[in-house]
Image (cartoon, grey):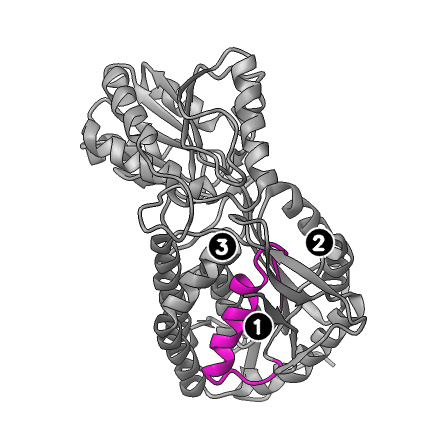
Amino acid sequence: MTFTRQLLIAGEDVPARSGRTTRDVAPYTGETYATVAAAGPEDVTLAVDAAQAAFEGWAAVTPSVRRAIFLKAADLLEERAEQAADLMAGEVGGTRPWAHFNVALAAGMLREAAAAVTAPRGDVLSAQEEGALGLAVREPVGVVAAFSPWNAPIILGVRAVAAALAAGNSVVLKPSEDAPLACGYFVADVLRDAGLPAGALNVVSNDPADAPAVADALIADPRVRAVNFTGSTNVGRIIGEKAARHLKPAVLELGGKNAIIVLDDADVDYAVDAAAFGVFMNAGQICMSGDRVLVHESLAEEFTAKFTAKAAGLPSGSPDDPATVIGPLISADAARRVAALVRDAVGKGARVLAGGGEPDGAVHPATVLTGVPKEADLYYAEAFGPVCVVESFATDDEAVALANDTDNGLTAGVITENATHGLKVARRIRTGIVHVNDQSVADEPQAPFGGFKASGYGRFGGRWGIEAFTNTRWVTVATQHAHYPF
């Protein structure tokens, strides 16, 4: 069954002005999963028109009403969990456990947004003038441009819009061309059905060839006052440069080259299970995935043997099979890209401990390498697939140096049974996120989520997400007449 979907503008499903559509391809079968409207710059202008028209009304909605909308949306999302799982399996090849995790976390984000609506914001200031009251207040910025990625589509679709809407902004969302339904229209439908007013959230899908023009039109529109983007570092640089050119703040959550460090006081069996999850969940297509597993030399032999055996035994194949752990990558091209990284590394001296070889369509097996030299592309490139490198270290200093030997700085895990030891190491790793006695993949709605260095800047989550999409204003009230020199 092939789905069709139009643009969502001003609360209505409308075709692109040009009448054009584009294919949304199922990665496991390679067949057309859906046909969606292909927006152009003229549709972006209409979407911003709608968002601007809706802004003042939505910002003026009482906190209790706004909060109720987000709470209802969270409930609706959980009620539609099976629909979301079917959608993610077809559109992005997501396994059912991954889809249900997406729903649970995204529902939590909506409830956190509901809480943020009535959370205290602002400060009372000490004024210099006698009888004056000073206030620092946070107010919505206006229209927010949001870009959502395909890899955790429900989570990241909700994250792209929830805090901005909760703060009273209106949003134009451009979802990934690889998952316009799951990370765009599905999320918008949930919010629309929960009572979000028409025009507060607008969605414009596009053909991949038109992505630069659509992004340009959205960011350049003078009514758009803030931007958020989650995706690759390469594209994030472009988005950040465009936003800066127009003096617009941006939140950029970009790629990672994340390390999982197994210290000498770790429980080996726990470390194996934790690292396997951190590396291979969603076939390694998570910005937080562990590309590198660094193991103390005293544990390296035991850990590597057990970890390699576990990786080799992970079932791969159809996302519809409940036993599947390693589902398809987002496309056959993505699988071939990962296989090329492995080939290049092996050709330059790396050894394959598990997996490797050519992919089966979009499915690449769980792969473990060791001895990857710096001249190999994989040493610094984000794999974004079911591939990791296992290396050993002798000292904490060496582990920290290896973990920091990357342009990225998103997340890390430090596995140890000694929290004090783990915290000492964790504090030295240059990332936006670090987890002691856990692997690198984690997210919670109330936590500040974001990276460092080439992994981006700004934070989603909790009060930090609200701050990202509000403007701080200084307001004074004089309770008596001031005296002027003339």
Relative to 294, say whether 184 is above or below: below
**Residue 393 percent across, percent down from the top left:** 34, 16
- Which residue was labeled with disc 2? 208
Q: Does 106 sit left or right of 170 as displayed?
A: left
Q: Does 205 sit left or right of 166 as displayed?
A: right
- Which residue was labeled with disc 3? 459
Q: Residue furthest top?
A: 349
Q: Is residue 181 magenta?
A: yes
- Residue range (magenta): 173-199
Q: Residue at x 28, y 30 (%)?
A: 310
Q: Residue at x 61, y 39 (%)?
A: 333
Element type at marker 2? helix
**Residue 213 percent across, percent down from the top left:** 78, 57
- Which residue was labeled with disc 1? 474
Relative to 119, say whether 439 is above or below: above
Residue closest to the eye, 35 or 226? 35
Is residue 460 in view?
A: no
Decide: few, some or many residues near mark 3? Use Cα within 10 Å; few <14, some 14-19, many ≥20.
Answer: many
Residue closest to the eye, 329 or 268? 329
Type of amino acid under label 3: Arg
Q: Which of marks 2 and 1 precedes in the sequence?
A: 2
Element type at marker 3? loop
Nearest to viewer (mark 1 / mark 2): 2
